[in-house]
């Protein structure tokens, strides 16, 4: 389910004294099944951009084509779009409102007028996808479970709609390390096992480097950089000028290189670093 964004511009409160350009002539494509990271400092336009992709906001100019359909045309159904492009907001557990976990996850499928057995099937599948036990949690209040579980309930509610594109805006914000790792692991599994197109908005360069195929960098309402993690993180000075950084492990590797260790410079994950350092240690032992 490819997405094509052409010359997208969004102006808040146009014509008023508070007019602000949130997106300025933004263009890019996302291929079917791709895992894309979206990064940028606060106010760069990331959240405004992703809210256009499932029709929550309409552009001032430009167009968005999802699976061959121009979703900016007034005649197009937002119901179709919301079913196929799921958006999980930052702190999505704040959107929970039903009496039980089951009812919260079932809310979207019920609005599609699906039969009860299909709704139950979707709730079970969605809970399984995010690692929640159906029998022990379905009748519990979403406000009586842990923060990490609430986050997964909210994600399950989007997955129960069976979207082809999943957009996650800072899905690990506020979670402890264990909850964060669980959520990221499940997102990675969803991409690998279900082939979903995933767009991940994050301030964590480590998470982005470890998970995504391609990165889009927003700055001052425009796309500043776009490419693979290796390509984007090679622009160290430009990223720093935008108020962004590179993964911490990359700083470590640069320090090792400055001290004479001959390891590759283009390392952006702990796994890559461990493999490179072990290779050098083994090479010295065998020398």
Image (spheres, rainbow, N blue to C red):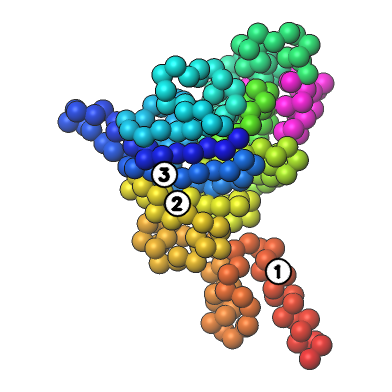
Give residue 17's position: percent from left, percent from top: 17, 31
Q: Is residue 287 above or below residue 82?
A: below
Q: Is residue 78 above or below residue 234?
A: above
- Describe the element under mark 1 as helix, strand or loop: helix
Q: Quadrant of the C terminus?
A: bottom right
Identify residue for label 3.
Answer: 27
* Between 188 and 28, the one nearer to me in the picture: 28
- Describe the element under mark 2 as helix, strand or loop: strand
Query: Residue at position x 60%, y 51% from top?
Result: 212
Contact between marks 1 and 3 (CB within 8 A): the answer is no
* Between 187 and 98, the one nearer to me in the picture: 187
Query: Residue at position x 19%, y 28% from top?
Result: 15
Identify residue for label 1.
Answer: 274
Give residue 138's position: percent from left, percent from top: 75, 19
Identify residue for label 2.
Answer: 217
- At label 1, counting other C-alpha atoms closer than 10 Å, the crowd grade (few under 14, some 14-19, many 20 or more) is few
Give residue 139's position: percent from left, percent from top: 75, 15
2 or 3: mark nearer the eye: 3
Q: Is residue 144 above or below residue 7?
A: above
- Residue closest to the far front: 68
Q: Is residue 217 left or right of residue 213?
A: left
The first of marks 2 and 3 along the sequence is 3
Q: Is residue 124 magenta?
A: yes
The first of marks 2 and 1 along the sequence is 2
Q: Is residue 257 above or below residue 130?
A: below
Q: Which residues are magenta?
A: 122-144
């Amino acid at each position: 389910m490819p997405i094509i964004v052409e010359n997208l511009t969004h102006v808040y409160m146009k014509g008023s004294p508070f007019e602000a350009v949130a997106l300025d002539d933004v263009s890019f494509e996302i291929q079917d099944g791709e895992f894309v990271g979206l990064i940028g400092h606060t106010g760069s336009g990331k959240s405004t951009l992703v809210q256009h992709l499932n029709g929550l906001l309409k552009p001032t100019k430009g167009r968005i084509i999802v699976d061959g359909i121009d979703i900016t045309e007034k005649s197009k159904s937002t119901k179709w779009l919301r079913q196929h492009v799921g958006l999980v907001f930052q702190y999505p557990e704040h959107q929970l409102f039903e009496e039980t976990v089951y009812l919260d996850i079932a809310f979207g499928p019920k609005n599609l007028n699906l039969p009860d057995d299909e709704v139950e099937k979707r709730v079970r599948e969605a809970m399984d996808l995010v690692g929640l036990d159906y029998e022990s949690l379905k009748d519990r209040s979403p406000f009586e479970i842990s923060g990490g579980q609430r986050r997964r309930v909210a994600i399950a509610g989007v997955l129960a709609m069976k979207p082809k594109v999943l957009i996650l805006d800072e899905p690990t914000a506020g979670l402890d390390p264990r909850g964060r790792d669980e959520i990221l692991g499940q997102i990675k599994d969803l991409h690998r096992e279900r082939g979903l197109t995933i767009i991940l908005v994050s301030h964590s360069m480590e998470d982005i480097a470890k998970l995504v195929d391609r990165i889009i960098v927003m700055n001052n309402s425009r796309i500043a950089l776009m490419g693979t993690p290796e390509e984007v993180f090679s622009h160290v000075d430009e990223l720093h000028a935008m108020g962004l950084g590179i993964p911490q492990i990359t700083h470590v590797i640069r320090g090792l290189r400055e001290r004479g260790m001959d390891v590759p410079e283009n390392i952006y994950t702990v796994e890559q670093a461990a493999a490179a350092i072990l290779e050098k240690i083994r090479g010295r032992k065998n020398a």
